[in-house]
Amino acid sequence: MENKIVAGNFKMNLTLDEIKDYINKFNVENENVIICPPFIYLPYFINKKYMVGAQNVAFEDSGAYTGEISPKQIKSMGITYTIVGHSERREIFNETDKIINKKIAKALENDLKVILCIGETLEERKNNLTEEKIQKQLENSLQNISNFDNIIIAYEPIWAIGTGIIPTIDEITSTVNYIKGTIKTLYKLENIKVLYGGSVNDTNVEEINKIKVLDGFLVGGASLDPDKFKKIIEVVVNQ
Ligand code: PGA
């Protein structure tokens, strides 16, 4: 079986001193571990024995886009991954599937690996609209994309992000199966990796990690503590 992936999304957290402290404590040697710090701290994480990712990426290579960072620039720093379409980008910064589609295309063109986040709201879950939402997100955001080798999907139910609420094992299993089935139907692709994200921590990861169809985790809050994050990684790696 291929190795599982564990990605840590720091979001807009930690100051420079905290980042330096983190790097000292985080002595992980594993290229299936990806740290996604805020952009300004990315250089501190390069050339370590784990991988590094951006949390977001622009949809053009260069030009008059104040405040944006392009995939070409990210790649030029020696960074391998970028998250695209996180629900916070979609909800707070109004990113649509169309924008996300452009970002994915440009990121792949620049040889970056993409972690595409998808997932439903609580209301959609309650109204049995999870599969419909996910199908739409996959269809729209992956339109005209052909290089799936560099795409990983992160299933992140919005109601589970930062809330401490985790879907049941059955809910995660069936949604991940649905994602893999949809990718197979739409794009004739058998082995796309699907991660789970949303309130994963060092105490619940062991249980969720038993889900066989899962290929790893995208961790937010619990990745901010290097010791907790190392525990999560150990559980997943030693399974
Ligand atoms: P959380 O965030 O682990 O803090 O719930 C996950 C994410 O947003 O990727």
Image (tube, rainbow, N blue to C red):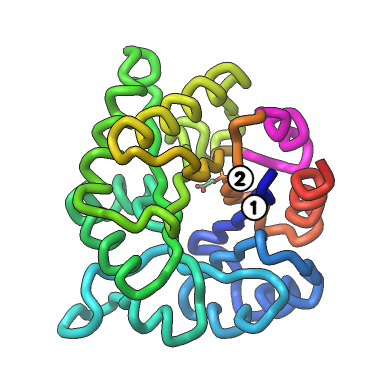
Q: Are marks 1 and 2 in contact (CB under 8 Å)?
A: yes
The residue to which callout 2 is attached is 217
- Residue 108 is drawn in which quadrant? bottom left
Where is residue 97 drawn, in percent x and y? 22, 47
Where is residue 40 drawn, in percent x and y? 48, 80
Q: Classify mark 1: helix, strand or loop.
A: strand
* Screen quadrant of the C terminus: top right
Q: Is residue 206 magenta?
A: yes
Residue 94 visible in the snapshot: no
Q: As drawn, is 181 to the left or to the right of 230?
A: left
Confirm if mark 2 falls within 8 A of ligand 1: no
Q: As drawn, is 44 to the left or to the right of 26?
A: left
Q: Earlier in the sequence, mark 1 or mark 2?
A: 1
Where is residue 48 drawn, in percent x and y? 69, 79
Mark 1 neighbour class, 10 Å CA radius: few under 14, some 14 to 19, many 20 or more: many
Q: Amino acid at mark 1?
A: Val
Q: Going 64% across and 52% down the picture, which residue do you hit? A: 6
Q: Which mark is residue 6?
A: 1
The residues colored magenta run 200-211
Q: As drawn, is 177 to the left or to the right of 84?
A: right
